[in-house]
Image (cartoon, helix red, strand yellow):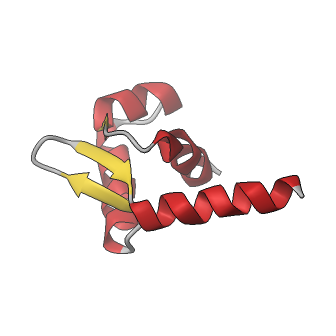
Amino acid sequence: MIVDDILEFLTDGGWHDFREISLNFGLLEGRVEAVMDFLSRFGFVDSDFVRGKVRLSSSALDFLRSMEEKSRL
């Protein structure tokens, strides 16, 4: 699922622009922006739509990292 792949891509905690994400996943930038808008509304990403950038929110990052640790056990 592409949203899962994008969330995993964002686990570095840094800011990524929509163009970078669209190129990495073969999506139109408008589609990336729509997905990021959805993820932002539900607190998964911090977004700067003026600059077209997003990063994983700290709570989502903590959650994904804890899930990764649990899967290794």
Q: Is residue 21 left or right of residue 72?
A: left
Q: How many marks?
A: 0
Residue 68, image x, y percentages: 73, 55
Of 20 and 8, nearer the camera is 8
Q: Is residue 24 left or right of residue 63?
A: left
Q: Is residue 61 above or below residue 50?
A: below
Quarter of the view holding residue 65: bottom right
In the image as oriented, which residue stretches furthest toward the left? 50
In the image as oriented, which residue stretches furthest toward the right? 73
Q: What residue do we see at 44% from left, 35% from top?
A: 27
* Quarter occupied by the C terminus: bottom right
In the image as oriented, which residue stretches furthest toward the bottom? 42
Q: Is residue 3 left or right of residue 35?
A: right
Q: Is residue 71 above or below residue 2?
A: below
Of 2 and 61, nearer the camera is 61
Q: What residue do we see at 42% from left, 44% from top?
A: 13
Q: What residue do we see at 71% from left, 62% from top?
A: 67
Residue 69, image x, y percentages: 75, 56
Residue 35, image x, y percentages: 39, 56
Residue 22, image x, y percentages: 40, 33
Q: What residue do we see at 58% from left, 45% from top?
A: 8
